[in-house]
């Protein structure tokens, strides 16, 4: 247990209002905070970043289709002039449910209601080598890292006279046949076909392969079999080598070893094969289930705890056909946040709480230009219509009119030119930062440096 006498988080007024602390500024946490604006509650939103990030478009940042700023929106800007909402950038360290207090990297804070919406992280299933050498795709910074890795590898490939060594730099391996893996594979295949050969005319692109490995027997397991089969057909049409029932056993930074003994070689392996919730000290010991998710009741209250809730990917709620929990997709978190928000407002008005029931509004996945699959209530479609639906749904879900405008402009430009103009390899020079800081410190201490 952390020290209970640690300093409290500064400049959050004790004004007698009931305080709701929301940890996590993702889809679910942000939705709930926005719903509680203009209520009589005091809302404190805590996140380790100072921005909301739109995860479904990470792959477009990774493939140079969008600027990172297009899919990230400052949380403080969202809540400007909202006097009852306070934002703090901090890491959650521990929860003490006995005294209703949380401990963060900024200090401690009392709560009346605590809502945990911290989401999930990449699951490496205990494989330390893959964790060390693989590239995850759960944040904007990781998407930028993947973009940099791809561009850096192609620069290195130019300096190789051995075709096999050049191929090792050019090949890209994706592990995980969910939406992230499928959409990224399609985007990379289109880069191979339309963009990279123009940037690197000296390279032989017949050496390059985009691989997609999925451990189960089909792609997009959360969608219909028809959508799964069509997605595989589209990817193979674009030139992606798709292998199902292919479990990656190890990766040393170059050699990929499958469980059946087959081997492949690439300096870029993207790991999108699973997720796990990070443990929350003081909570997970009491309520964690498979994958670290927290067991909640019909009102998203964590089992056995008072005034503590979990929503989004973190929550494990049994309902009807979802005895192993709802799918870990944005729609679940948004709906849970909406219902919990209404219930908290009802609580102030003395009204009865309503139980949460998930309404499946369908699933979408895009594979490439004019190619997508859609499973919607009452209709399943593929191809151009599904692609248009995917574009519209994702554009409308972006936070900020300005962000929507720039994304639309980028999409239109990329569609008509088959080119992305964001292939910039920007790497921080850590040494220069360190030297500069050291110089300033020595100058401050009266040491003259030439």
Image (cartoon, rainbow, N blue to C red):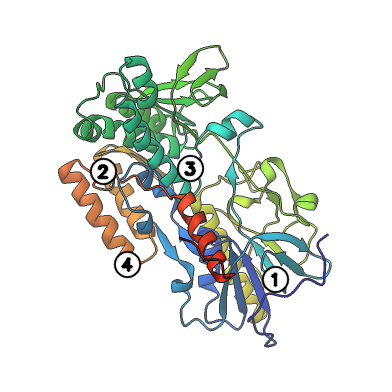
Q: Which comes before the other along the chain, label 3 or label 2?
A: 3
Q: What separation in Å lies between label 3 and label 4 (alpha carbons)?
A: 25 Å
Quarter of the figure that contains the C terminus: bottom left
User: Residue 34 placed where, x, y %?
Assistant: 50, 71
Q: Secondary structure at mark 4?
A: helix
Q: Is residue 245 at all visible to an observer of this figure?
A: no
The residues tagged by marks 1 and 2 sit, at their Cα atoms, a distance apart of: 44 Å
On the image, the x and y values in percent for residue 147 come to 38, 41
Give the residue at mark 2.
Answer: 385
Q: Are marks 3 and 2 in contact (CB under 8 Å)?
A: no
Tell me what residue is drawn at x 30 percent, y 50 percent. 391
The residue under the point 56% across, 63% down is: 29
Q: Label 2, label 4: how many angstroms apart (C-alpha)?
A: 24 Å
**Disc 3 versus disc 1: nearer the observer:** 3
- Per the model, the C-alpha gap separating discs 3 and 1 is 32 Å
Crowding at dot 1, Cα within 10 Å, few <14 / some 14-19 / many 20+, comes out as some
Numbered mark located on residue 401 in the image? 4
Q: Earlier in the sequence, mark 3 or mark 1?
A: 1
Badge 3 marks a residue whose secondary structure is loop
Q: Are marks 2 and 4 in contact (CB under 8 Å)?
A: no
* CB atoms of marks 4 and 1 within 8 Å: no
Mark 1 lies on residue = 113
Q: Check the image and name the residue furthest to the left.
A: 416
Neighbour class for label 4 at 10 Å: few (<14), some, many (≥20)?
Answer: few
Q: Which mark is residue 137?
A: 3
State the mark number for residue 416: none
Q: Nearer the viewer, mark 3 or mark 4?
A: 3
Residue 163 vertical position relative to residue 238 in the rendered view, above or below: above
């Amino acid at each position: 247990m952390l020290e209970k006498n640690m300093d409290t988080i500064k400049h959050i007024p004790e004004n007698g209002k009931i305080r709701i602390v929301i940890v996590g500024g993702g889809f679910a946490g942000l939705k709930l905070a926005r719903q509680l604006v203009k209520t009589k509650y005091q809302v404190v939103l805590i996140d380790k970043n100072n921005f909301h990030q739109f995860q479904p478009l990470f792959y477009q940042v990774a493939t140079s289709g969008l600027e990172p700023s297009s899919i990230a929106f400052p949380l403080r800007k969202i809540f400007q002039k909202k006097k009852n909402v306070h934002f703090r950038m901090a890491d959650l360290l521990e929860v003490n449910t006995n005294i209703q207090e949380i401990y963060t990297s900024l200090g401690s804070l009392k709560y009346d209601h605590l809502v945990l919406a911290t989401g999930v992280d990449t699951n490496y299933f205990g494989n330390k080598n893959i964790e060390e050498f693989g590239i995850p795709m759960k944040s904007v910074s990781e998407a930028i890292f993947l973009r940099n890795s791809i561009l850096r590898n192609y620069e290195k490939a130019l300096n190789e006279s051995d075709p096999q060594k050049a191929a090792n730099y050019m090949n890209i391996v994706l592990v995980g046949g969910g939406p992230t893996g499928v959409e990224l594979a399609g985007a990379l295949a289109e880069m191979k076909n339309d963009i990279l050969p123009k940037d690197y005319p000296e390279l032989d692109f017949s050496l390059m392969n985009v691989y997609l490995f999925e451990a189960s027997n089909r792609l997009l397991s959360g969608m219909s079999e028809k959508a799964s089969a069509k997605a595989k057909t589209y990817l193979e049409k674009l030139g992606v080598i798709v292998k199902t029932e292919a479990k990656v056993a190890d990766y040393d930074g170059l050699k990929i070893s499958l469980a059946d003994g087959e081997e492949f070689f690439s300096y870029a392996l993207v790991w999108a094969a699973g997720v796990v919730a990070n443990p929350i000290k003081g909570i997970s010991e009491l309520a964690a289930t498979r994958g670290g998710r927290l067991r909640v009741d019909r009102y998203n209250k964590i089992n056995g705890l008072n005034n503590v809730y979990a929503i989004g990917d973190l929550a494990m709620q049994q309902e009807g056909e979802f005895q192993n929990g709802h799918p870990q997709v944005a729609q679940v978190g948004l709906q849970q946040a909406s219902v919990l928000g209404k219930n908290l407002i009802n609580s102030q008005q003395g009204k009865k709480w309503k139980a949460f029931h998930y309404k499946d509004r369908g699933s979408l996945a895009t594979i490439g230009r004019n190619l997508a699959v859609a499973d919607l209530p009452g209709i399943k479609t593929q191809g151009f219509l599904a692609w248009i639906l995917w574009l519209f749904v994702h554009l409308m879900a972006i936070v900020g009119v300005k962000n929507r405008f720039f994304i639309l402009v980028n999409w239109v430009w990329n569609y008509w030119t088959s080119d992305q103009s964001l292939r910039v390899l920007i790497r921080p020079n850590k040494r220069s930062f360190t030297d500069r800081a050291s110089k300033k410190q020595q100058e401050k201490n009266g040491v003259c440096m030439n």
